[in-house]
Amino acid sequence: MNKPFAITLDVGSSLANKTGSWRTQRPVYLNRKPPCNHQCPAGENIQRWLYLAEEHQYEAAWRVIMEDNPFPAVMGRVCYHSCEKVCNRGQVDLPVGINSVERFLGDQAIKHDWQVTPGAPTGKKVLVVGAGPSGLSAAYHLARSGHAVTVLEANDKAGGMLRYGIPKYRLPREKLNVEIARIKRLGVDIQLRTRVTDFAATLAAGHYDACYLALGLQRPRLESLPQQGALPVLDAISVLRAVELEESVALLGHVVVYGGGNTAIDVARSAIRLGALSATVVVLEARDQMPAHPEEVREGLEEGITLLNLRKIIQIQDHTLTLEIMVSGEGRETLPTGQTEALHADVLVQALGQAGDYSLFSSLPQEVTMQNGAVLVDRNGMTSLAGVFAGGDMTPSARNATAAIGAGKKAARHIDRFLSGAVESACLPQELADIRWMNTRYYSEAPRTIRPILDVVRRTSGFAEVVGNLDEDTALFEARRCMSCGNCFECDNCYGVCPDNAVIKLGPGNRFKINYDYCKGCGICAAECPCGAIRMETEQI
């Protein structure tokens, strides 16, 4: 007897109809690089430690930071957080307060005395010249690789410009001291009051296998100004150093600071705290072209400093400065107008940049290659001397503390490969997580948490820290504002919206895979992925 057509098919034969054969595009899970990670000069895995922080795993989050940066409490205060400028959250409401959370984690580590451990000894000795942020960062990473590290520092204390160039109201010294002490506990030998004058003799005496030069820029760049009379003209480096050492410094009466960078603003704000009648910053550039960070400028203006933008000092006559009025040209160019005005000053401080002192190279049998006052290095950070590496401000680079820390880390990795004979493995560039591939409708409104700040009267009465901390609740909230750009956080959206049930869950922490036998390539999963971790690719025929 013949069966009806409807029941002639074998049981389960519908599964043979693999609808994925209709597909012209296929969804692919991938990990895109978050813009914050890409922007960070220290190379931190910011998204990773934010994820751990929002899960209350504070120590684990701190340890992720410490893989790249040994100064989270310091940099949570003085880093200008360029990562936040590129944060995709800023196109939804306001950027995640990355710097605030880093500061919270750094302070948690100090509170709970979290430590790191050195690597297994390699028997190799490395010399680091300079105990600033770059030199200390290199020493930290080299010690974690197991190398014996000696740091030679000319000053009485380690820290470089973190200590002698950034006032205490921005960076309390107890935070800096603790993070330097943590590096010393790795076995790093920091020898203070030890100026290197004969580099060749120092290398030979220590039998070092490699060296990292992180001298920084110790000398001020001064403009020669026509002067008649006895107006005191100081340099910003000496002034900030005297403020740090609590030495007498003549920031009294009407103080004029010449320069537009962060150092100029720091001098002016310090002058206000030391009792100056006024602090005026004469700036060659327009306000929006100043090198100084906008937050520093804003806080300085709140505290009473005055800005005179598009002005150039052309003459000093007794206590009168003659300023030429400038106008903005193309780009960052400024043009003279020929018009002048007068400004009274009781003291003038020049803050026009810094230069290096490379007299220690004079004893070398061959010259170190330099250009425009900077030491040139190859792609591995090595100078023209074999085994001698350099980084930080003394090389062509962005000159700030975060960049210096990143340079120290990179140098340590290059030195480690140099000592071990390892070959650097090629690293394929990672696609950036663009907000165009994200579905931000899934993120709830979450206003940014702002760090508390002292009132102006308390700020200007001394050198107490100006900006306060987030507490645990607000730090946790801020970490949770991260949108996990470009990386799956297992929200199950793709699993829930797939009309073909082609998305397979692999269990917590293992994300998903797609059964392409049944995926038609409709693209709903990619369109609905909040973080942009799915890309539609053309099907290969």
Image (cartoon, rainbow, N blue to C red):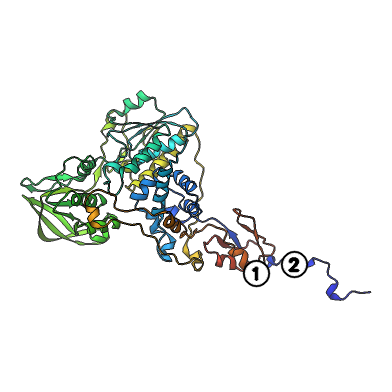
Indicate the secondary structure of the residue bearing disc 1: loop
Q: Which residue is mark 2?
A: 17
Say which of marks 2 and 1 sits in front: 1
Q: Position of residue 513 (x, y in %)?
A: 63, 58
Q: Quadrant of the N terminus?
A: bottom right
**Number of numbered discs:** 2
Q: Is residue 535 left or right of residue 505?
A: left
* Residue type for callout 1: Pro
Q: Is residue 267 above or below residue 488?
A: above
Describe the element under mark 2 as helix, strand or loop: loop
Instruction: Say if residue 390 shows up in the picture.
Output: no
In this orientation, which residue lies closer to the viewer: 169 or 328?
Answer: 169
Do residues under tags 2 and 1 come within 8 Å of each other at their CB atoms?
no
* Residue 377: quadrant of the picture: top left
Tell me residue 43's x, y (percent).
43, 48
Q: Is residue 448 left or right of residue 438?
A: left
Horizontally, is 302 left or right of 182 in the view? left
* 10 Å crowding of disc 2: few (<14), some (14-19), many (20+): few
The residue depicted at 45 percent of the width and 39 percent of the height is 115
Q: Which residue shows up at 44% across the image and 44% down it?
A: 66
Q: Answer few, some or many: residues within 10 Å of disc 1's Cα (few below 14, many 20 plus, some between 14 and 19).
A: some
Q: Amino acid at mark 2?
A: Asn
Front one among 521 and 42: 42
Left or right of 497 on screen, residue 202: left
Q: On residue 19, which mark appears?
A: none
Q: Which residue is mark 1?
A: 499
Q: Position of residue 301 (x, y in %)?
A: 22, 58
Question: Which quadrant would the C terminus be assigned to in this image?
Answer: bottom right
Q: Quarter of the image holding residue 493?
A: bottom right
Q: Could you give the CA–CA distance between mark 2 and mark 1, rounded to whole angstroms? A: 16 Å
Most extreme residue toward the right is 1
* First in residue order: circle 2 vs circle 1: 2
